[in-house]
Image (cartoon, grey):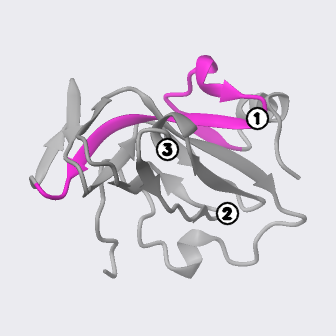
Amino acid sequence: MILSDANIREMLKSGDMGIENFEEKNLTPNGYDLTIEEIYIFAAKETVKEGIAEIPPKSGFAVSTKEFVKCPPNLAATLWIRTTWARKGIIASFGMIDAGFHGTLTLAAYNSSDEAVKIDIGNRFAQMVFHLLKEGAEKTYDRRSGNYQGQRGVTLEGKSG
């Protein structure tokens, strides 16, 4: 089952899940829009934490979310790039947020266009869609690998990587 905006509010209020730095305006009918805390530009080996990051054409970058997400054992989430960015030539392939994960998210992306793309720190970048598991995970993220458990900021390598 995908959680609606009302389901998300209810789970946040009860403490069954968490989103630090939650903003009501980022809630969507069936998810939550994640905002940019910082951007690491691979080609420049530069981290931008305020203002505007200019992503060169044909180059990769990583975004860290402002939100610190806490998924309980019975909740996972998928990530989708906002179409605003896709229309500008930004492409990304995101993974699943596993049940039991706690941390900010590092999202890798690529500017496939022939022009530089300007991205404001604090802008919305991806939508997180929550999926309620039929039953809680037998082994949550922290017990499987936990490589990025508790991360804050752009994290390019996990504990084992």
Q: Residues within 10 Å of mark 2 (few under 14, many from 20)?
A: many
**Does the magenta run of residues contain 20?**
yes
Q: Earlier along the polypeptide chain: callout 2 or callout 3?
A: 3
Secondary structure under badge 1? helix
**Does the magenta run of residues contain 27?**
yes
Secondary structure under badge 2? loop
Residue nearest the viewer, comparing 45 with 145: 45
Residue 57 percent coordinates (x, y): 23, 49
The span from disc 2 to disc 3 (Cα, nearest Å) is 27 Å
What residue is at 44 percent from the left and 54 percent from the top? 91
Q: Residues within 10 Å of mark 1 (few under 14, many from 20)?
A: many
Q: Earlier along the polypeptide chain: callout 1 or callout 2?
A: 1
The span from disc 1 to disc 2 (Cα, nearest Å) is 15 Å
Above-or-below relation of 68 to 92? above
The answer to whether residue 49 is seen in the rendering is: no
**Looking at numbered disc 1 in the image, what kind of residue is underneath it?**
Ile
- Report which residue position mark 1 lands on: 8
The span from disc 1 to disc 3 (Cα, nearest Å) is 26 Å
What residue is at 31 percent from the left and 80 percent from the top? 161
Above-or-below relation of 93 to 89? below
**Looking at numbered disc 3 in the image, what kind of residue is underneath it?**
Ala
Q: Residue furthest top?
A: 25
Residue 40 percent coordinates (x, y): 22, 49
Q: Provide the residue span drawn in magenta.
A: 17-43
Q: Residues within 10 Å of mark 3 (few under 14, many from 20)?
A: few
- Report which residue position mark 3 lands on: 86
**Mark in front: 2 vs 3:** 3
Residue nearest the viewer, comparing 133 with 129: 129
- Report which residue position mark 2 lands on: 99
**Looking at numbered disc 2 in the image, what kind of residue is underneath it?**
Ala
